[in-house]
Every structure is written in C-alpha cells, then in structure tokens.
Image: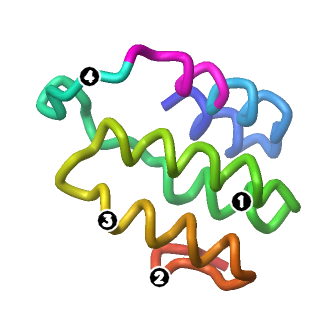
Amino acid sequence: MLAFIVIQNNDRAAALKYLREAMKAPVSTDASAWRPGPWGPVCSDLIRSGYRSEVIAFLEFFAQIDAPRRNELLASAAQLRYGHVPDWYRL
C-alpha cells in the first residue's frame, strides 16, 4: 500500500524501496492473512520507468504468497521476461 501512495507522487525510488521491503516479509501459506493491494498500478508504473527486473522479482515473490493467483503472477513474470506486458499492465 505504501508503494501505491508514493508512486502517485512519482517517487519511484520510494516505491521500489517499499516493494523490496515487502519481499522481506516471511512467506506464509495462509493467503487469507494478505489483503489484495494496488500492486498492478505500482508495477505498471515501474515497468514503464524501466524497472522490469525488479517487478519480475516482486511478482515471483508474490506468487509464493498468493496461491490462488500463483499461476497468473508467474505467467506475468514470464511475459515480462520475454519482453511482453501482462494483461493487467496499464498505459
């Protein structure tokens, strides 16, 4: 959520910091403990700004936590790796 707030002010450095901090959270198999966040707009902005590899790392981490969307997240990471953008990408 913090990354979403700072990206609204075009503070990509802070958004990356918060994304990296989120990846330090312990991996839990209890997906019910996680609330869906506005990661799509944050990741879209970071992709546009050239932070593709950082977004891929975040998506792969998030896939470990969000079991119901694991396949979608990993597919998005793969699309980015091959130079494409996922369906949720916003221009």
Q: Residue at x 44, y 62 (%)?
A: 74
First along the sequence among labels 4 and 3: 4
Residue indicated by mark 2: 87
Disc nearest the viewer among 1 and 2: 2
Judge whether 15 appears above or below 73 on screen.
above
Whole-percent x, y for residue 58 in the image: 58, 43
First along the sequence among labels 1 and 4: 4
Answer whether labels 4 and 3 touch (C-beta < 8 Å): no
Q: Amino acid at mark 2?
A: Asp
Q: Is residue 23 magenta?
A: yes
Disc nearest the viewer among 2 and 3: 3
Disc nearest the viewer among 3 and 1: 3
Q: Amino acid at mark 1?
A: Asp
Residue indicated by mark 1: 45
Q: Quadrant of the C terminus?
A: bottom right
Region in magenta: 20-26
Front position in the image: 74 or 19 = 74
Residue indicated by mark 4: 28
Q: Amino acid at mark 4?
A: Ser
Q: Secondary structure at mark 3?
A: helix
First along the sequence among labels 2 and 3: 3
Q: Residue at x 62, y 80 (%)?
A: 85
Q: CA distance from mark 3 to mark 1?
A: 22 Å
Residue indicated by mark 3: 71
